[in-house]
C-alpha cells in the first residue's frame, strides 16, 4: 500500500465511484477528506457502500508539485515507479506497433479459418450421413431387384418344366 499515494499522484489519473461516476483523483481525495472531517454520519449505512476513508495529510494531490529535495527525501518517492511512468508515456516504436498489428491480423485470419474449418467439418459430417443413407437405400433397392429377378427366374423354370412335361405327354399321346 505504500506505493498507492505515489500512484494516486500520477497526473491525469481518474477514479470511478458508484455514487459519483468518473472523477479526478484530487477531487475524490478532497471529498473523502471533507467526509472524514465531517462529524455527522448517517445512523444506517447500506452494506454495499464503503465507509468514508480518511486521507493522511502527507498524500500529494494532482495539483501539488513537490520540490525536488522533498521528493527525493520523501518515503513515497520511488525512482523506479517514476521511470516506469516515463516509459508508459513514450509511445511504442513503429516496428513494434506494426508487429502487433500483423499479429492481430493473423489472429483474426486464424479465427476466420477455424470458423470455416468447423463449418466445413459440419458439412462433411452431414455429407457422410447422407452417403451412409444413400448406400443403405441403394442396397435396399438392389435387394428388391434381386428378389424380383429370383421370382422371375423361378417362374421361368416352372414354365420350362411345365412346357417340357407337356411336350413329353403330348408327344406320347400323339405316338399312340
Image: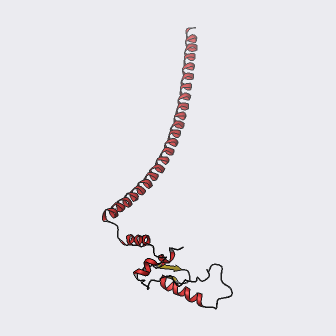
Whether 172 is drawn above or below 94: the answer is: above
User: How far from the left and from the top, in percent, is residue 70?
Assistant: 44, 81
User: How far from the left and from the top, in percent, is residue 89?
Assistant: 37, 73
The residue that appears at 37% across and 59% down in the rendered structure is 103
Whether 88 is drawn above or below 118: the answer is: below
The residue that appears at 38% across and 61% down in the rendered structure is 104
Numbered-mark total: 0
User: How far from the left and from the top, in percent, is residue 147?
Assistant: 56, 31
On the question of residue 89 being in view, the answer is: yes
Task: Please tell me which residue lies in front, 156 or 6.
Answer: 6
Task: Using residue 17 as the reference point, say whether residue 67 is left or right of it.
Answer: left
Task: Please tell me which residue lies in front, 173 or 134.
Answer: 134
- The outermost residue toward the right is 43
Which quadrant of the figure has residue 73? Answer: bottom left
The residue that appears at 51% across and 79% down in the rendered structure is 16
Whether 20 is drawn above or below 165: the answer is: below
Task: Please tell me which residue lies in front, 2 or 117.
Answer: 2
User: How far from the left and from the top, in percent, is residue 34?
Assistant: 56, 89
On the question of residue 10 being in view, the answer is: no
Amino acid at each position: 500500500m505504500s506505493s498507492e499515494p505515489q500512484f494516486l499522484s500520477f497526473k491525469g489519473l481518474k477514479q470511478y465511484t458508484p455514487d459519483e461516476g468518473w472523477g479526478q483523483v484530487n477531487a475524490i481525495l478532497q471529498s473523502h477528506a471533507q467526509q472524514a472531517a465531517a462529524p455527522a454520519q448517517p445512523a444506517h449505512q447500506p452494506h454495499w457502500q464503503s465507509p468514508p476513508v480518511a486521507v493522511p495529510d502527507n498524500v500529494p494531490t494532482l495539483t501539488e508539485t513537490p520540490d525536488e529535495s522533498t521528493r527525493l527525501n520523501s518515503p513515497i518517492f520511488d525512482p523506479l515507479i517514476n521511470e516506469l511512468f516515463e516509459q508508459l508515456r513514450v509511445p511504442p516504436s513503429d516496428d513494434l506497433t506494426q508487429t502487433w498489428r500483423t499479429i492481430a491480423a493473423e489472429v483474426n485470419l486464424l479465427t476466420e479459418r477455424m470458423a470455416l474449418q468447423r463449418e466445413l467439418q459440419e458439412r462433411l459430417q452431414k455429407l457422410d450421413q447422407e452417403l451412409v443413407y444413400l448406400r443403405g437405400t441403394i442396397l435396399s433397392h438392389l435387394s428388391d431387384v434381386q428378389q424380383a429377378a429370383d421370382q422371375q427366374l423361378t417362374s421361368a423354370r416352372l414354365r420350362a418344366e411345365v412346357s417340357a412335361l407337356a411336350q413329353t405327354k403330348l408327344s406320347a399321346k400323339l405316338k399312340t
